[in-house]
Amino acid sequence: MDIKDFIAPFAVWKRAFEKPFTVKKPIDERPGAPRYRGFHINDAQKCIGCGTCEAICMNKAIDLVPAAGYAAKEGDSGLRPRVDYGRCCWCALCVDVCPSGSLGMSNEYVWIDSDPEVFRYTPGVEAKPWDGSPLGYRRAEGYRLLEEQRVEMPELDYKEAVQTFLELVRGYSRQQAEKEADRCVSCGVCIASCPAHMDIPGYINAVREGDMQNGLRLLYETNPFPEACGRICTHRCEEACAIGTGGDPVAIRWLKRYIADQVELADYGKVLPRAEADSGKKIAVVGAGPGGLSAAYYLALLGHSVTVFEKDSEAGGMLRYGIPEYRLPYPALDKDIGYIESLGVKIERGTAVGSAVALAELRSRFDAVYLSTGLPAAYSLEVPGDKHPRVLDGVAVLAAATRGEPLGLGKRVAVVGGGNVAMDAARTALRNGAAVDILYRRRKEDMPADPDEIREAIAEGASLVEKAIPLEVRDAAGAIAGKQALFVWNEARMVQKEDGKRPVPEAIPGAVHEDPYDSIIAAIGQGPDLSFIGEADRLELRRFKPVVDGFGRIAEAAAGAAAEPGAPASASPSKAAAVFAGGDLVNDRKDAISAIADGHHAAQGIDRWLDRKGS
Amino acid sequence: MNELAERLARRYDAEGWHEQRKDLASISIPALRVRDVLAWLRDEEGYKHLSFITAIDNIERGVFTLTYTVRNHDTKHSLMVHADIIRENPVVDSVHLLWEQAWTYQRELKEWFGIDCPGSPRKDEEFVLEGWDQLPMMRRDFDSLAYSNATYAERPGRVTHDPAAYMKAQLYPEADQ
Amino acid sequence: MKRDRMPYIPPAERATPDLDSGKYLLMWQGPQHPGITGNMSLRLVIEGDTVVDCETHVGYLHRGFEKLMERRSWMQNFPLVCRIAVPEPDFNEYCYAAALEELSGIQIPEKAVWLRTFSLELMRLASYLMWIGGQAGSFGHGTIIQWSATMRDYVLDLFEELTGGRIYHMYIIPGGVRGDVPAGYFKHVLEVMDTVQKNLDDIELVMYHNAVFKLRAEGLGYIPPDWIDRYGITGPNARAAGIKRDLRKDLGYLAYPQLEFQPVVGSKSDAFERARLRLQEMYQCIDLIRQCIDLMPKEGPFRAKTPNPLYWKVPAGETYVAAECTRGEYGFYVVSDGSEKPRRVAVRGPSYTHAVSVMERLVRGVNIADVAGLMVSLHTYPPEIER
Ligand SMILES: Cc1cc2nc3c(=O)[nH]c(=O)nc-3n(C[C@H](O)[C@H](O)[C@H](O)COP(=O)(O)OP(=O)(O)OC[C@H]3O[C@@H](n4cnc5c(N)ncnc54)[C@H](O)[C@@H]3O)c2cc1C
Ligand code: SF4
């Protein structure tokens, strides 16, 4: 023992006059650090109620509950996370994982109450003093638990693509598909946005697990056109995707395609269900587009015997005669259709209802009839000169391309319209060596076509002329008269006519342009052709549309009311089979998946109706 | 290191040498040789330090896999020595004479897995649990969630909703008709 | 009672005192224990004021972490593991994350390596500051703990600023860390380091050059060097016996190979030597923290990409990742069967032997008043025993 050991301790007396470390009492406000993990805050407007926070929470501290002022709608479940502080451990994994980034934490940590029940609340919905606190834990810049970026889809180079009709999108490899599938959090918010309400998380999980058979089974539960839809679907689901709120949405459509591409047609039968027993009922379907064939598939699964009447020489409807093969190659479509036919569905190709066979006849020969005849009649430009021989109809051009007929579009082509048909026509023209202008009345952002389509059309060399109002088509002068046409259009500006409505184009006086083209392709919309429905059928139509109930059954005029004197007895509604309708003919969405959903729904409706008839 | 693997194979029928890192490997030995192998490793091969002993319930194979992790401080190398014992009658020799802390691990093995190491001091005394009358808790077939549900009450008033199901009920209930 | 009538206890064996003889008193120390030793209890048999026999009893904190981990996904275990050692949680986070990364083949960015090293040293310092208060307090020095608790609070403020939490930092996440340092952070760190260093100088004078502390700690709890391997003793408890082992050097993980330091070793191997050595390590921590700040890359990503946390499947395999914590070898043994949850996670805490086998041996013959001081000199944390 040293003398130092007795004296040294006193040395610190020198600190007696220094400022003490202790804090004054009463304790001053002591805010949490700027990153403090305090009580949750949630930007309830930004939150879409996907529940990923609930899924990650290891303490089961989060419930998803309906929140006042937030109704379920596409892309928003209407639910909001509710935190139970009896369980929360303040780990903030919920904040880290939140796809939209709406969830955060305030730096507030003091909350005293004698009622234990209050420590459970819905941040952002039930007001709290720390709402909107700029301080507190947020996911750090550059740190995400979920992958924001989509796995890039291998595509043909645009320069190369425009030379051929080869499929542009090459499809994911196994590794790419599994990586992309792994981005999904299985919240299921997308399901409501899919017209067919496909089990999206289910089949994405199948990709993740590498279980293609289960994937295919899940696809066919709601959609017998996975090869086609996996390529050309309007993919509304991706707009609702939770991951899309903070990055690229999951490539749901490409993953669907991936599954279907992996399974050989010959193996489909091993996985997919079949009818248990023959019902003895016969159903006629008019139109072998996706809608008609979807109805046929589900009717066949229910044991009914189905005959499809198709006026064209090939089945597929607009998927074949509209959509060009670089987007949907025929073998892929044939695979979908081939499987449906393999279930015993008969397709009478080249048999138009109305000419080859009358609707009334179908109604007497079959137990029910489903109409899915689509929109075959193109709208014309409705300007002077629109009957000029060089003014072509977009759908007809595409159908001719499908049939392999020479298109003779010439060197300079104008495509008028801003929808998918216009993009397809423009890109088909490009592939035929033409220089293409796309003329559209409004702005690019107003175009109804899929943004990818617009981007690709432009990348392939089409030039987009916005705010161009067609005025007139005039014949070219001189030797090329009849071979070329002058397209006259007026430059427009966008005017906000009514608040809350979208702006409308208004012609700028004097800004009139005149350009010569070898062909002018009108792609401004199509309408139905219901000439095969006669008065005697007593089917109710309104504005060229059948009037249908929830299952797609067409309303029938009461017996006698609309009956023509002398109408054939077999057409009497009481005796004739019920007629259902769906697809482009009926719905407003006018895309393949809606037609498929209609077909599925109608199949269920027809089945019930047959049941109810009890015959 | 592979010389060690060979020696272990020759002397003790060890197999499955796996190099996990440059300073970590694993090997499997017959359970009957556990004490011999560990003593030999300790005394002849420099693996003097016992890091820990534990077990893995490989219920699918009907065995418990024991893991003895030892370190050679001179070569800075660790070795995980595995031995399978059958689940039905899980008994293995005690190594408490090799390391003074081993008996605690063996007491833990008894309480958590039901693995018996005859001769290990205080092996049958309670370790971390008190009055436990269920299956040994670390066995895979002891369902801790079921136990917790049966033993503790949920706090009332909690209800949650699945987004997809809720949206279906709100937006397209007809799909269930 | 006469001392010379104490029963002779052979070195390797336990006494079997006859409790009915009236010569002995059975006494429990703990589990309520306001010191840093936490909720553990010692079942002591004493004769007069001398301990004759001791049994360590644990289980008062047991929450079945290892079992819970088998039910949670790989990422969900990240916020769970830190709870296994309350006063020093970050080593759990590191070992768990490193094991996952190793099994999944994930390389973490350089910056993350440094931030991990930095935060682990900061943790070590906080943990030692808590220990030193406990060590002084258990020998009756109430003042030191006032000081060291304040210093620790300053360090916890630094953790709060960096990670958003004071006790459970949940900063070392699989893949890297959860964020870069906030603006101006290292300035705060250096200020706090200066304050702590100044305070440590005071503590050295008051505690280490103090006759009372010396008298009670010197010669107490002597660990013979040949016990080190026999008992699996690690960390300062081993180094104080002259065994130069430090996993930071021996395994060379994280950024330690780039840092300049030598393991602190002693020779006397008693409670005082261990305390002296830990004080030196605290200075070393401060030095390492300063080195980290100097050497750390200023820019760059701090986290590698990991799979979707809801579905992360770690490839089948097993590994054991160890790190040098304040008490010695801390390790996670992680087994994956290739599924979304761990097959088995076993935690190796140094107290497993220090607080049980070693403690039970060392405490025999010790005066009852020194039991707490002895226990703290072994630096034991019960939660890492019971997991
Ligand atoms: C160019 C173009 C591109 C498109 N791109 C996309 C796209 O990318 N994504 C998307 O989802 N949708 C796209 N669509 C829309 C999609 O093709 C249709 O929504 C879908 O095909 C509608 O299916 P449907 O069964 O209702 O009708 P259709 O596919 O039009 O099928 C109707 C069928 O009925 C036949 N038919 C008609 N009348 C009779 C009759 N009297 N007797 C017998 N048969 C008859 C027709 O020949 C035709 O085969 C596109 C459409 C076009 C024109
Ligand atoms: S902070 Fe952690 S424990 Fe609390 S609700 Fe979020 S995920 Fe659950």
Image (cartoon, rainbow, N blue to C red):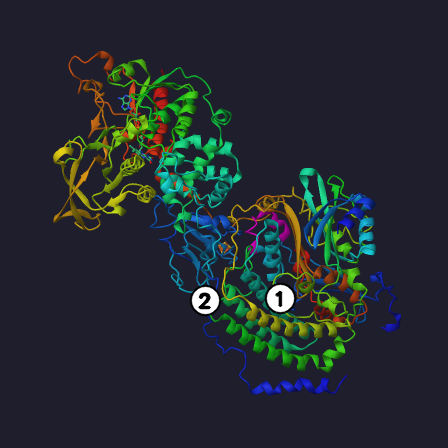
Task: Return the residue at label 2.
Answer: A34
Image point (69%, 76%), residue name: C140
Residue A456, percent across and down? 33, 42
Q: Is residue B76 left or right of residue B164?
A: right
Q: C288 or C282, which is in the foreground?
A: C288
User: Range of the magenta residues?
Assistant: C65-79
Residue C184, percent across and down? 47, 71
Instruction: Note whether residue C83 is visible.
Output: no
Residue C384, percent across and down? 66, 59
Q: A92 or A521, which is in the foreground?
A: A521
Subunit of label 1: C
- Label 2: state its secondary structure: loop
Q: Is residue C232 above or below residue A565?
A: below
Residue type of the residue flagged with mark 1 = Gln
Q: A580 or A66, which is in the foreground?
A: A580
Q: Is residue A17 left or right of residue B76?
A: left
Task: Return the residue at label 1.
Answer: C258
Residue A455 is drawn in which quadrant? top left
